[in-house]
Image (cartoon, helix red, strand yellow):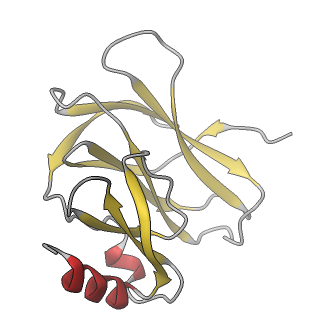
Amino acid sequence: MLKLEFGKATISAKRAGPITYLMATGVCKDDGETYDFLQLPFFIYPPQWGFFVKIGGSTLKKDDSFSYTELIQYPPNVDFVHVKTESGSELVKIENVSLNFIPYAESETGIVGMFSVFNRIGTMEYMIAKADAILPAIYKHVFGPAAYEECEKYMKDHTGK
């Protein structure tokens, strides 16, 4: 059975339209760590989140750096996220960004097979995300997996048509 423990990371949050991205960066304490944000089971508003570490299922080694991003639905009228980590609880300010924000691009640009293009159903809005990203049901997969640059080209060729 996997054991969940609160993890240590630097947490940030960005909001692009209806989607909020929770992002954690840090250094692995043990071999094989994987990461997750989970909503804490408290019936309060706004919801609180925890950053967790699981051991196993990863090729990361002790002292490797990591970056983990999760897409969440979060109340649009709240400008902070309460996140509990190994270091305690913190209020993370949500930075508003444009709808075409790409949360993975800085560290993973151009890696073949890592990105796909998704379309917001009923609109001409497109976004690029990791190919294995779990998105709200308002998005459908339309292209990829492919290199990030190929996804950008697809979006350029299909936006506004």
In this picture, residue 42 sits left or right of residue 138? right
Percent of width and height locating residue 18: 24, 42
Residue 98, picture quadrant: bottom left
Q: Name the residue rendered at 38%, 10% in the picture.
A: 44
Percent of width and height locating residue 9: 45, 51
* Residue in the foreground of this view, choosing between 42 and 63: 42
Outermost right residue:
1
The quadrant of the image that shows the C terminus is: bottom left
Q: Residue 146, relative to residue 69: is it above or below?
A: below
Percent of width and height locating residue 30: 70, 59
Q: Name the residue rendered at 32%, 64% in the picture.
A: 103
How many numbered discs, if any?
A: 0
In this picture, residue 72 sits left or right of residue 2? left
Q: Name the residue rendered at 71%, 72% in the picture.
A: 59
Q: Name the residue rendered at 42%, 80% in the picture.
A: 108
The quadrant of the image that shows the N terminus is: top right
Percent of width and height locating residue 107: 39, 78
Outermost top residue:
43
* Residue in the foreground of this view, choosing between 42 and 4: 42
